[in-house]
Image: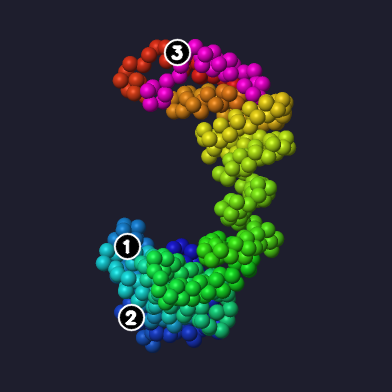
Amino acid sequence: MDDIETELNIAAARSDSPEDKDRNQEQIKQAVLLHQSQPDPRGLFTAIDFLKSNRKCLKLIREAMLRHNWQEAARYFSSYIQTLEAGTHPQVRSAASEITWRLGTEILRHLPNSSLDDFNAFYEQLKNFGVRNYSKICLEHCFHLMLNGQMDEAKRQLSIADSWRYGKQSNAQSMTKKLIRSYCGYLDYLIWNEKKTSALGSEEECANREMHSYFRQASVTLKEIVSQPGVWDPFVLSYIHMLEFYEDKDVALQVLENYAYNKEFPLNPNAHVYLYQFLKRHKAPRAKLIGSLRILHSLVPSHELMLELCSLLLHTKQMSDLEEALAVSMDLLEFSSWKCSIKAWKCLLNIMKKLKMKKCINTVRKEWNVRRSLWLSLHYRSYIARRDSLQNVQLLMVKRDVLRFTGENSKYLMIISDCMQKVSVPSVETLQKTMMKGKTNQHFSDHFSCLMYQP
């Protein structure tokens, strides 16, 4: 709210300029002034009084919202609206239009008795209050209607917003209007999807014709939008879904490749994810799948699809691909979100086993030497071993086996190897039950004390 007060101050300064001197003397309705002001000798309230009243009202609204007293906030907000409508200072009204929008919607969402009609009336009032945010308000109004299941009304509101023109203001909102155009197509897609569900169990020609009509409307709009540079993830997925339904796979592939590879578009990892998933669904050659995931790896090396990339590289039987799989899997495990993933560690262990079978264990050790200092501090620390011994013994065993392949001659490896040979490791559930009953076997206690190591 402080940023809005700043805007109001700037607007006040502008309104005190010589060219606005006469405007500052315009009358303000006394009934809505919330501070103690005295009129000038002519009985008029000035723009300064107007601004002081606004600041006081905003402060009271903020205090009520912080206390979650929404009824009181609504009363002060009503006074604030009246104050703005009473004054005729365009610069101040423009600066205040966004605060009115933000505060009003927040208060309405928390009022216990607010209805959809209240929201609709408020959004219509906002659209008439100031044109600077007209397109954004229309878009938010549409979202609210969609969340309440009123697709037809949302479509009608978007159509009105799409056709809105207001001189320079409409030109300044061209990006938002492009988004409105996009959601017009997206709503057609949602309605098409509903019609599709009902038409699949029906043989009526009318239902199929209506469904196809919405497909044509949606496809024309979405095709136009996704061909322009930008990030259009939900609209691309919607367009591809329709094309796949009508088995137009070539066009769908062309759209996805343009979205992923066109240099005019911003870098977007999701574009490569969508392309890979499409290729996988339609059983594309392994080389195409690998190529798509390689680009994704260069953008997001921690993506979950890197496990699939490793799996694909393992099946090519090429030595270079096997080395690449080793690097990809080790890159993955250097991200904190994957440190405790048994699936990622098993993937790395499997790659190392295959390299050993091909008598290329030196490749593993060469890669290890590059990463040794990082991995010892990231994965092989005393507290990590203690945690794994209590939470995930299987993970600890896999990490031990991985370390063996690296040729690392550490105290940790020797201690764990000896302990694993002498005792059978209980499951985590068994160990926790035993400790809760206070019957922890000294044999197991000695075993787990062995897991406390220093790298």
Q: 103 and 36: which one is in front?
A: 103
Residue at mark 1 to residue at mark 3: CA–CA distance: 58 Å
Q: Is residue 372 above or below residue 9?
A: above
Report the residue marked by disc 1: 110
- At label 3, counting other C-alpha atoms closer than 10 Å, the crowd grade (few under 14, some 14-19, many 20 or more) is few
Report the residue marked by disc 2: 30
Residue type at numbered disc 3 = Asp
Q: Residue 70 at what x, y percent from top left?
A: 30, 63
Q: Earlier in the sequence, mark 1 or mark 2?
A: 2
Q: Name the residue at 60% across, 67% down.
A: 226
Q: Nearer the viewer, mark 1 or mark 2?
A: 1
Q: Is residue 383 left or right of residue 64?
A: right
Asked whether the residues under the numbered discs 1 and 3 touch, taking CB atoms below 8 Å apart as contact, a structural biologist would say: no
Residue type at numbered disc 1 = His
- At label 1, counting other C-alpha atoms closer than 10 Å, the crowd grade (few under 14, some 14-19, many 20 or more) is some
Q: Is residue 405 magenta?
A: yes
Q: Quadrant of the C terminus?
A: top right
The residues colored magenta run: 404-431
Q: Is residue 157 above or below residue 196?
A: below
